[in-house]
Amino acid sequence: MTATTDREIVVSRVIDAPRELVFEAFTAVRHLSRWWGPAGFTTTTRSFEFRVGGVWDFVMHGPDQDFQEWITWTEITPPERIALVHGESRDDPHAFTSVLTFSAEGGATRLELRTVFPTKALRDEAVEKYHAVEGGEQTLSNLAAYVESEER
């Protein structure tokens, strides 16, 4: 057990596509806008720059609510790893960190998304109020469907 276990959410999935393609799906808005978010959500990007220190400023449109979102990339190691900070804005005190790892498994990719919240209470709120685990699983499912269809 790590020091952050009570503040973490970990979601993973094996995607039937090469890891370079899965990684590439995170590199450009033309990809992200086609799969990002849970089932029933769409995304509108205000700005996007995929580089360390770059920002993705966007709105996730849910069935009954819009969510202002902001991500800054803190590490990009193609095609193995992406680390980021995610919140509602640059100065969001409740922002969380996420690390995505892309591992080749034959011709497929195991993608693990590990998110650490500043406090256990914020993690619990994300799980209970915003259904973060189900949303993460749905987002990875959308990604899988996207890259698997691109591969064909």
Image (cartoon, grey):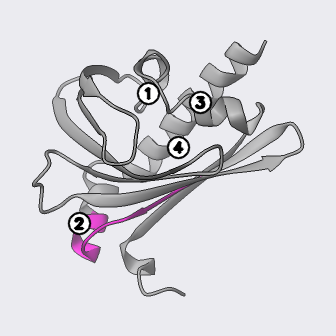
Dot 1, how many residues are within 10 Å of its Cα: few (below 14), some (14-19), or many (20+)? some
- Whether residue 117 is visible to the viewer of this picture, yes or no, is yes
User: Which residue appears at 18% of the width and 34% of the height?
Assistant: 67
Which residue lies under the disc numbered 1? 39
Q: Earlier in the sequence, mark 3 or mark 1?
A: 3
Which residue lies under the disc numbered 4? 137
For residue 54, above or below residue 112:
above
Magenta segment range?
A: 112-124
Judging from the image, what secondary structure is the residue with disc 1 in? Answer: loop
Dot 3, how many residues are within 10 Å of its Cα: few (below 14), some (14-19), or many (20+)? some
Which residue lies under the disc numbered 2? 122
Q: Amino acid at mark 3?
A: Glu
Q: Position of residue 96 (x, y in %)?
A: 29, 60
Q: Amino acid at mark 2?
A: Leu
Which picture quadrant has residue 89? top left
Tell me the CA gap for discs 1 and 2. Answer: 23 Å
Tell me the CA gap for discs 4 and 1. Answer: 10 Å
Task: Please indicate whether residue 102 sits to the left or right of residue 39 in the image.
Answer: right
For residue 31, above or below residue 105:
above
User: Which residue appears at 12% of the width and 55% of the height?
Assistant: 92
Task: Please indicate whether residue 40 sits to the left or right of residue 76 in the image.
Answer: left
Tell me the CA gap for discs 4 and 3. Answer: 19 Å
Q: Position of residue 100 (x, y in %)?
A: 53, 52
Q: Earlier in the sequence, mark 2 or mark 3?
A: 3
Q: Earlier in the sequence, mark 4 or mark 3?
A: 3
Judging from the image, what secondary structure is the residue with disc 3 in? Answer: helix
Q: Amino acid at mark 4?
A: Glu
Q: Earlier in the sequence, mark 4 or mark 1?
A: 1
Q: Which of the labelled discs sits on residue 24, or is there none?
A: 3
Q: Amino acid at mark 1?
A: Ala
Is residue 121 or residue 26 the one in the foreground? 26
Any magenta on residue 72?
no
